[in-house]
């Protein structure tokens, strides 16, 4: 997952937003569902782009950086962290 936290200058947003991009392809969407995220790194500051295409290219580049970073041993334990597991499983665990 890569995530933008900020004002999204390309779209002239007037409110700060948090926009995660899940790198894995899923069959269904997550609208209305709880989504748990953990921020484990920082890739770059927010930037404006001359075109939508250049913004999309940079997001995909950020995704490749994140995928490589998440393969590092220092991040390996996060995929099995109980916080990121199904909330129903967490509610029944204790």
Image (tube, rainbow, N blue to C red):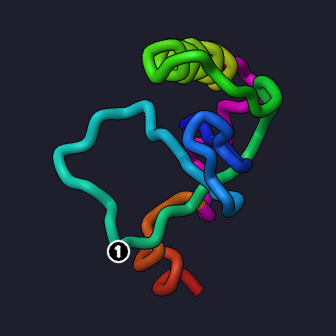
Find disc 1 in the rendering and name its residue: 32
Q: Which residues are magenta?
A: 71-83
Q: Main secondary structure of the magenta part?
A: helix
- Which residue sits at x=77%, y=24%? 43
How far from the left and from the top, in percent, is residue 44?
Answer: 79, 24
How far from the left and from the top, in percent, is residue 32?
Answer: 35, 74
49 or 66: nearer the viewer: 49
Is the residue marked by circle 1 packed among few (<14), some (14-19), or many (20+) residues within 10 Å? few
How far from the left and from the top, in percent, is residue 41?
Answer: 79, 34
Q: Quadrant of residue 78?
A: top right
- Which residue sits at x=51%, y=18%? 51
The secondary element bearing badge 1 is classed as loop
70 or 7: nearer the viewer: 7
- Which residue sits at x=17%, y=45%? 27
Res. 71 in view: no
Q: Does 51 sit above or below residue 26?
A: above
Position of 16 compared to 50: left or right?
right
Position of 86 compared to 36: left or right?
left
Position of 20 compared to 53: left or right?
right
- Which residue sits at x=25%, y=42%? 26
Q: Does 21 sit above or below residue 71?
A: below
12 or 5: nearer the viewer: 12
Res. 73 in view: yes
Q: Quadrant of residue 69?
A: top right
How far from the left and from the top, in percent, is residue 64?
Answer: 55, 14
47 or 69: nearer the viewer: 47
Q: Quadrant of residue 9?
A: top right
Q: Quadrant of the N terminus?
A: top right
Q: Inspect the magenta stretch and tell me whether residue 81 lies in it.
A: yes
Q: Does 83 sit above or below residue 41?
A: below
């Amino acid at each position: 997952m890569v995530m933008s936290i900020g004002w999204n200058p390309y779209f002239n947003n007037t409110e700060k937003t948090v926009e995660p991009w899940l790198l894995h392809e899923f069959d269904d969407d997550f609208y209305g569902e709880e989504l748990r995220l953990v921020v484990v790194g920082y890739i770059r500051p927010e930037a404006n782009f001359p075109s939508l295409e250049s913004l999309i290219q940079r997001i995909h580049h950020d995704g490749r950086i994140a995928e490589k970073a998440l393969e590092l041993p220092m991040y390996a334990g996060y995929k099995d962290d109980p916080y990121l597991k199904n909330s129903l499983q967490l509610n029944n665990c204790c």
